[in-house]
Amino acid sequence: MISEHFDGEMIAKTVGHFGLETIRGSTRRGAARVLLQAIKKVKKEGYDLGITPDGPKGPRFTVSDGIIVVSQKADKNIVVLNCIASAYWQLGSWDKFIIPKPFCHLQFYCSEPFKVTNMPMKEAKEVVYDKLMEHSLQ
């Protein structure tokens, strides 16, 4: 799921070179359409889905509803992925976006799959948040 803005277009083209498909939209533009597409891809077509949980505008480290809605409606697990760079540039944007420096070491973290299917939204978001923070630069 990638925004329809210019930065989203760059990301979509980049991941397209690796054979990955994208669903374009955001919480502000076409949110219902994007969620329905995502649920269909996951539930009916067997796709895996990657979502940045804090959405396109944040606030930083806040889990948006999208990941929870897709997981619950499709009755699928969530797996949290994280990457920490030993050296990086950090942007002054709201999310303090990190760009790894060339030749640095990258550590990748992957949680065990977990479900949020029968949880209230608030509780499910807290579970995802806790998993995200286990390996984070903050």
Image (spheres, rainbow, N blue to C red):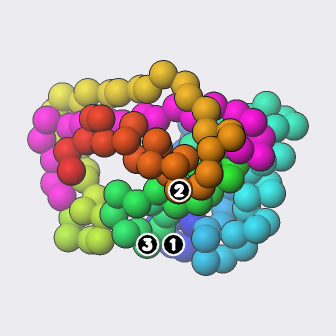
Crowding around mark 1 (Cα neighbors within 10 Å: few <14, some 14 to 19, many 20+) is few
Secondary element under disc 3, as helix, strand or loop, is loop
Looking at the image, tell me whether mark 1 or mark 3 is earlier in sequence order.
1
Q: Amino acid at mark 2?
A: Lys
Residue at 69 percent of width and 69 percent of height: 31
Range drawn in magenta? 72-90
Looking at the image, tell me whether mark 2 or mark 1 is earlier in sequence order.
1
Residue 83 percent across, percent down from the top left:
31, 36
Q: Closest to the observer: 116 or 108?
A: 116
Secondary element under disc 1, as helix, strand or loop, is helix
- The residue singled out by tag 2 in the image is 122
Label 2, label 3: how many angstroms apart (C-alpha)? 19 Å
Residue at 61 percent of width and 32 percent of height: 115
Residue found at the far bottom of this picture: 28
Residue at 61 percent of width and 39 percent of height: 116
Residue 125 percent across, percent down from the top left:
50, 51
- The residue singled out by tag 3 in the image is 57
| Magenta-drawn stretch contains 108 | no
Secondary element under disc 2, as helix, strand or loop, is helix
Q: Left or right: where does residue 98 sit relative to residue 60?
A: left
| Magenta-drawn stretch contains 82 | yes
Residue 6 disc label: 1
Q: Amino acid at mark 1?
A: Phe
Crowding around mark 3 (Cα neighbors within 10 Å: few <14, some 14 to 19, many 20+) is few
Q: Amino acid at mark 3?
A: Lys
Mark 2 or 1, closer to the camera: 2
Residue found at the far left of this picture: 87
Question: Residue 71 falls in which quadrant of the image?
Answer: top right
Question: Residue 76 falls in which quadrant of the image?
Answer: top right
Residue 28 percent across, percent down from the top left:
61, 77
